[in-house]
Amino acid sequence: MSKSASRARLADIIRARSFGRGEITLASGRKSDFYFNLKPTMLDPEGAALLAELTFEALREDNVDYIGGLEMGAVPLAGAIAQLSWLKNHPIAAFFVRKKPKEHGARLSVEGLSKTETLQGKRVVIVEDVTTTGGSAIKAAESVREAGGVIVLVLTMVDREEGATEAFAAAGLPFRSLYKASEFLKA
C-alpha cells in the first residue's frame, strides 16, 4: 500500500474506532466537544500495523536509537514500532516512562531497558497517542533527559491543536504529528 493509501486507511480506522463527539473532560482538565481515544486503534491488528508503519517511515531519516513515552498511550505504539523496526532491519528499541516510579523493586522511572542498557547519549523520540497541551510528553522528555537521553523529536499520532506546538517550542522540543484534529473535525 502506498504511504498516502496507508494514511487514508488509518484515518478511516481512527475515525471509526477512536474519534467521537460529545462533551468530555480532557487530561488537561479542559472540556471539549470531541475526543480521541486511540487505544482501540492502537490495539486493533490493522490499526497497530498502520500506526507502526507510518511512524517508522516518519522516523526513517532521524537516526533514532530509542522510542518511548509516558505510560499508557506510548506503550503499544513503542512496542509496535520496535517490532516493525526489527523486521525492517533498522532496529529502534522501545521503553516507557512511568507516571510515578513503583514503590518497590528497582523503583525506575524509565522501564524497558536491560541492566546493561542506558539512554545516556542516545537519540530518543518521545511518542504519544494524542496530544493536547503537551504536558504528558514533556514529563516523559524530562525523565529521558534526566537519564541522559537526547530528545530528537516528540511525535504524536493526533495533535488536538490546543497548545502543544507552543509548549514544545518553549521546552526546546521539536514536534511533529501524523494527523491534526482538524482533519477529523471537518469530515
Image: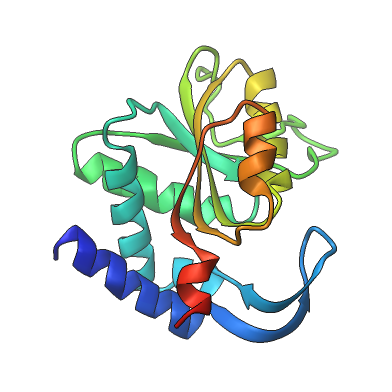
Q: Which residue extends farthest left?
A: 1
Quadrant of the frame with the N terminus: bottom left
Q: Quick check: 12 left or right of 116?
A: left
At a point 76% along the width and 34% down the height, the residue shown is: 105
Percent coordinates x, y for residue 65 in the rendering: 40, 26
Q: Quick check: 134 left or right of 46?
A: right
Task: Decide: is 9 above or below 116.
Answer: below
Instruction: Examine the rendering and report whether any part of residue 185 can be seen.
Output: yes
Q: How many marks?
A: 0
Q: Which residue extends farthest top?
A: 121
Percent coordinates x, y for residue 86 in the rendering: 26, 40
Foreground pick, 184 / 103: 184
Instruction: Examine the rendering and report whether any part of residue 97 can be seen.
Output: no
Foreground pick, 12 / 99: 12
Q: Which residue extends farthest front?
A: 186
At a point 68% along the width and 29% down the height, the residue shown is: 171
Percent coordinates x, y for residue 33 in the rendering: 71, 80
Task: Decide: is 56 above or below 142.
Answer: below
Quadrant of the frame with the C terminus: bottom left
- Residue 90 occupies quadrant: top left
Percent coordinates x, y for residue 143 in the rendering: 69, 29
Task: Decide: is 70 above or below 153.
Answer: below
Instruction: Say how the picture is coloured.
Output: rainbow
At a point 59% along the width and 83% down the height, the residue shown is: 20
At a point 61% along the width and 15% down the height, the residue shown is: 148
